[in-house]
Amino acid sequence: MAEATSLWAVVALPPVLVVAAATVAAVDARPGTGGVAGTGREVLRLLVQQRRSTNASDRLLLRGGVILLPMAALLAAAVVPFGFTSVSDLPDGVVWFNAMEALAWAAVWLTGWGPNSALSMIGGYRFLAQGLAYEIPHMLALTTAALGAESLRVGAIVDAQAGLWFALWMPVSFVVYLASALAMAFWGPFDQPVGSDAAGGAGVELSGVDRVLFLGGRRLLLTVAAAVSVPLFLGGGHGPLLPGWAWTLVKTAAVVALLLWVRRRLPVLRMERWTAVSWMVLTPLAIAQALLVALVVLGR
Amino acid sequence: MLSAVVLHALAALAVASGVLVFVVDSMARATFSLLTSLLCVAGVVIGLGLDYLGVVTVLMMTIEMAVMAVFMIMYMMNPAGLMPMTMVHNTRGSAVLCGLLFVLLVTGVLLIPWPEPRGRPPRDATRELGMSLMGPQMLTMMTLGMALFATIVSGVVLAVRGGRYDRRGDGLDAGREPGPSRGDVGG
Amino acid sequence: MSLQAVMVLAAALLCTGLFGVLTQQSVVMLMMGLELMLGGVVATAAGTWHHLAPDRADGQVIVLVAVTAMALEMAIGFAVVTALFREREVDVTDRAAELKE
């Protein structure tokens, strides 16, 4: 059902996403920092700030990592349908999305490595450990959705949910997806890669434009990961009364709100506890759910 | 036309960054120029019509190189390239050998009368691959699966410095000693 | 991209990788050379599939095997280096051979 896209979609995607991520940042701003106006002021201040540099830093890799993070999020968003239209409904959209998320690993590690600073390096290493632990259940959750629709094309997965949403008959995958999406965007209880116990982790030495790109890219990644859960598990643009694009907006906003709420409600645990949860709880659960869905698909 | 230009540019970039791997001093830069090279190869694979395999290569190589970077830093004496040093042997002989091999291969590539293409590409190459892996190529698939499983097991056995059975006995009942690292799972 | 162009790309990658494998002393750098050589194999397989036999999936299967081989090589390689380093504190091929005696 995915319609052919025109050039305007390519042009419109980045600004729409940036606005969405800015909204997330403003809504999520800590009390006392001034909400929307405060966030805007902070971004402007950083944009005009002169960049600090550290001794013997690897500037090439640092810049590469900082730019790669928002780029990866934007490229991942290319397969997300807005209503029923996406920038490019690739035949392997699900794999593409996952591959672009993997680029974020490289981006965060590069950002941590670049400044030649111990705490920032620790942040980069932390993200690799977290990414590795959560990639397995994440991949399994994505695979389960593709399995239910018998297609890797995101548009086909949306079509398969015209009746029943995948979130309803593969709830475990949905929950695993949301948890691992949080980990992939190092958000909420998984924010140890930029945690305050390492003075800001991978982002500690960043200033000026770099800081805006890196922290903004992280919010872009969160927004895109939340937006992908809509076509994969929540029926995409399907819904009564409202047109497709409106449903996409409403559902994405709901998922983002849920993730922001989770951030406020869950404690930040030591990282190794969360990785243990991933290996020993989420991975087996995700495999069991995939098996169940496979049996249902075979019996259809 | 445009796609041909892009593909040739990708190929050139792949070779250039492949050479850079052994030129740059910094291990982090070497790792990521290898990643660039392999991503360009994946781009060429996509351009040749194998979009699924190309994207899978991007996914696997990115993760692989990110992990590789950790080991590079861990086991190299000069990870950031701040103190230039060389750790090579037999450079001249190898260069001559590899140069000759390259000339030989290219001559072969250009002189061999390649056969005409047989058949047309299927409408959905990914589907073709899946059907083949689950049908005539089932043996390959099972071999790959077993090889991956064996790698997981032997990798862990080689790399772990005494697991929980070493610390707590075969019955896991010899007291609760803390593991060698924090977050050691399974007691 | 013509078959010859793909093959030349693959040959260049293979020879660069081989040069790295032969010259580098560090085990980790040696593995990077191996990865580069396998990258050449991937390009060759994709090229032959596209230009010689697109109606059969064999070329695709070879790409898959090569990519898996890259992953396995790295996993086992690093496990061996870790075990070797723990045992003897070496990470250089020459010294690993000397210590055997």
Image (spheres, rainbow, N blue to C red):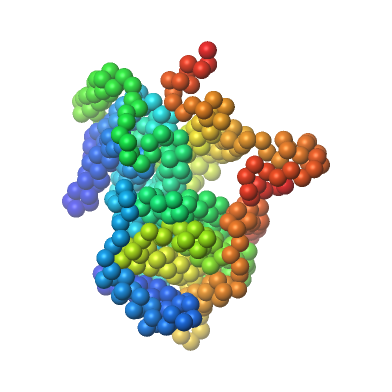
Is residue B138 among the parts visible in the rendering?
A: no
Of residues B121 and B153, the one nearer the viewer is: B153
Q: Quadrant of residue A217?
A: bottom left
Task: Determine which quarter of the picture holds residue B72.
Answer: top left
Q: Residue furthest bottom?
A: A241
Q: Can residue B8 be seen by looking at this rendering?
A: yes
Judged left or right of residue A181, residue B78 is: left
Above or below, B51 relative to C82: below
Residue A89 in the image: x percent, y percent?
A: 38, 63
Choose between A143 and A112: the one closer to the eye. A112
Q: Pinpoint residue A176: horizontal percent, then vertical percent.
A: 59, 62
Residue B129 picture quarter: top left
**Residue A55 pos. (x, y %):** 32, 50
Q: Position of residue C48 (x, y in %)?
A: 33, 36
Position of residue B51 in the picture relative to residue A255 (left or right): left
Residue at x-position 26% and y-position 71%? A48
Residue at 37%, 63% (x, y): give it. Answer: A214
